[in-house]
Amino acid sequence: MSILALAVKSLLSRRTTAVLVILSIGLSVALLLGVERLRTQARASFANTISGTDLVVGARTGATALLLHSVFRIGYATNNVSWTSYQEIARHPRVRWTIPLSLGDSHRGFAVLGTSLDYFRHYRYARTHGLELAAGRVFDDVYDAVVGADVARELGYHVGKSIVVAHGAVDAGLSLHDDKPFRVVGVLRKTGTPVDRTVHVTLAGLEAIHLDWQSGMRVPGATVSADEARHHDLTPRSITAFLIGLDSRTAVFHVQRFVNEYRREPLLAILPGVVLQELWDAIGVAEQALLAVSALVALVGLCGMVTALLTGLNERRREMAILRSVGARPRHVLTLIVGEATALATTGIALGVALLYLALVVVRDVIQTRLGLSIEIGLPSRHEWLLLGAVLLASFVAGLWPAMRAYRQSLADGMMVHV
Amino acid sequence: MHRALTLVLVATIWVSIPVALAQERPQAIDWKHLIPKGYDPDELVRKYQHEVSTMRDNDPRAERAAERLRRAWENAPVVESLNNKTVKLAGFLVTLEGDGREVSEFLLVPYFGACIHVPPPPSNQVVLVRTGSKPYKANQMFDMVSVTGLLRTERAHNDLASASYVIEATRVEIHKP
């Protein structure tokens, strides 16, 4: 019987310990990879939300706050931008296109965004992708609406559906603009960005539903019907923010300064790329800490393995003596122990990866709904392979200690065991 | 026969090496090389120096002067002879497009940050850099980098008379001064 076969039998006789070790390494590897994957996917998902936009302009607030509420729909604006200011800035000679954004209302948990046709023409994400329709068309009429992929999927909307928008950020069935329903005319294709969770309407439509509203309530006795509203002047008085595309990217600092020093209103213009970078630098510290913790957990798993091997050595002295008697040299004993450690770690790593994929399949939809992040279930990335390799190497090194112990013991014991 | 072949081989190598080197060697330039001779961006600063230094910040006259300065610097001329040259330029990186770890498009500027009291740099002192297929792994904001690549002068979309610099980078690395 070969030494390898004997080794396997030996391991099987110590199954319980072996299984526990494999499980602890598996869980720690799953955690390590899970954290790493979540981190990189979240970062990419965030960064891919907006592309090709030179400036984001809103009422004067903090740079990060402006980026978060206007592009990611996280948080709220502190003030609005007047229509006059928007028009004047849009007329700046270096400005090629603008996309107005009007936020504030919601529909069954999804944000309602008032915008213009320029949104569908110029909005870019993930570097080069533009918005595409999965069904229907973009808006034409005042009460037309175009919904994002997730809105259509979760609420079961299709082209032609009539929907009612709620006033304010939480749609709880109160404060509904139910006298002026919108009609879904288009559904967008999935983008993996907050666009998927947005109901897009016309700026005129938003104005229409608020015509007879004052301070958040419908004014009794002064109601305007949906059709009557069409004949009013539906030019907005203000918007929440707007995106700017310039005719030359190097002009960005000049236009930014122009907006920041605009006398008529306190406004803020930010470079989205720069602010995203700032955001990552701030979060980066927390990310590194999280990664360090996961690495420590993996280390603890390996320590468990070393402990199990070391404590088992005493009981296995007779086993080693038997192995010596069938021709094993002390160096074979060393190889055996190191091999065991590596085998346990490899099985643990395989289990860990399997656990990770299982967890991802289960949790993916929840993360998508709650956080708006899309996590890919693809093969491990190069970085992840490196992490796995590092764990394997660490297990090899860790196995050397009990292996050396066993080596010296078998030298001292020879073929006789003095228990 | 043998001798002839060897001779041809040696001759080919002899000629191709200097040709290759001549094409690839980037010309190390400084920010002042991007300003055409005869154009003095500071001339306007000096002209309005008096007004700017004797007024308070919120004075509308100071703003009008700053406005004129800004507009002049927005359309600064470029050096056409640098078009299509391979160059190497060092400056500060301002991210335009990136995925949080890698930067695929950025602006290269001559100084760190932008002082509120002074207008942003003239348009011939800002370079748009595209990294193409090899994005740059940014360490932190405003890294000081050295960019090697093909420099081009591109016209603006709206205003064909106004041009700016673009570098299609082949190499971007941290610059240690």
Image: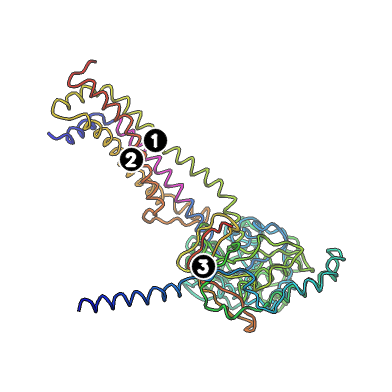
> What is the three-letter code of the residue carrying label 2?
Gly
Closer to the camera: disc 3 or disc 1? Answer: 3
Q: Which mark is residue A348?
A: 2
Drawn side of residue A161 relative to residue A251, left or right: left
Q: Which mark is residue A243?
A: none
SS assignment at label 1: helix
- Residue that label 1 marks: A301
- Residue that label 3 marks: B148
Residue stretch rendered in magenta on the structure: A17-38
The residue closer to the viewer here, A85 or A239, is A85
Drawn side of residue A365 relative to residue B7, left or right: right
Are the residues under badges 2 and 1 in a single subunit?
yes
Predominant SS along the magenta part: helix
Q: Quadrant of the rendered structure where residue A6 is?
A: top left
Whether tag 2 and tag 1 are in contact, CB under 8 A, the answer is yes
Which chain is mark 2 on?
A: A
Which quarter shows the N terminus of chain B? bottom left
